[in-house]
Image (tube, grey):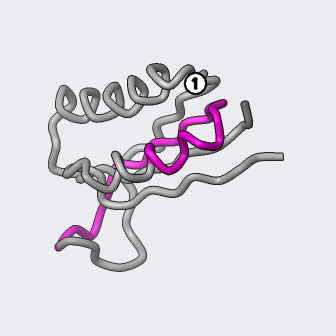
């Protein structure tokens, strides 16, 4: 198990319940793959550097996680197909 930081940006027009469902879905994927979520940090709405999918703002979320490196590919694929997620980045923390 390695430590990672996952930052993803969710569409700003979602209400609180839909936003929480997206975050819980991502957390569920990680825990189902025997991963551990060490910390969840909500950064709130922030202005994007450039327009992405006709959005100029986004809701930022940071997850500090521990997971198997092989699961990273599956997690990236799932995040890519999750419609409310505008962008994401997974970084290895050493």
- Residue 51 is left or right of residue 48, and the answer is left
Asked if residue 63 is among those painted magenta in the image, a careful observer would answer yes
Residue 91 rendering spot, x and y as whole percentages: 65, 53
Residue 69 rendering spot, x and y as whole percentages: 65, 42
- Residue 72 is left or right of residue 12, and the answer is right
Assign the N terminus to one quadrant of the image: top right
Residue 59 rendering spot, x and y as whole percentages: 35, 49
Total labels drawn: 1
Question: Relative to 58, does residue 30 appear above or below in the rendering?
Answer: above
How crowded is the residue under tag 1: few (<14 C-alpha within 10 Å), some, or many (20+)?
A: some
- Residue 8 is left or right of residue 34, and the answer is left
Looking at the image, which is closer to me, 93 or 44? 93
Looking at the image, which is closer to me, 3 or 69? 69
Question: Relative to 31, does residue 7 appear above or below in the rendering?
Answer: below
Name the element at disc 1.
Answer: loop
Question: Relative to 52, does residue 20 appear above or below in the rendering?
Answer: above
The segment highlighted magenta reads 54-75
Residue 17 rendering spot, x and y as whole percentages: 18, 26
Q: Residue furthest right?
A: 94
Q: What residue is at 44 percent from the left and 56 percent from the top?
A: 88
Q: Residue furthest front?
A: 70
Residue 5: quadrant of the picture: top right
Q: What residue is at 38 percent from the left and 69 percent from the top?
A: 48
Q: Tell me the residue that label 1 is attached to.
A: 35
Q: What residue is at 45 percent from the left and 42 percent from the top?
A: 61
Q: What residue is at 63 percent from the left and 32 percent from the top?
A: 67
């Amino acid at each position: 198990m390695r430590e990672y930081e996952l930052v993803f940006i969710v569409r700003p027009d979602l209400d609180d319940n839909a936003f929480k469902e997206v975050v819980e879905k991502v957390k569920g994927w990680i825990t189902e793959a025997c991963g551990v979520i060490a910390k969840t940090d909500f950064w709130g709405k922030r202005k994007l550097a450039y327009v992405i999918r006709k959005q100029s703002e986004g809701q930022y979320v940071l997850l500090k996680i521990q997971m198997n490196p092989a699961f990273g590919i599956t997690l990236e694929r799932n995040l890519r197909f999750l419609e409310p997620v505008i962008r994401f980045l997974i970084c290895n923390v050493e």
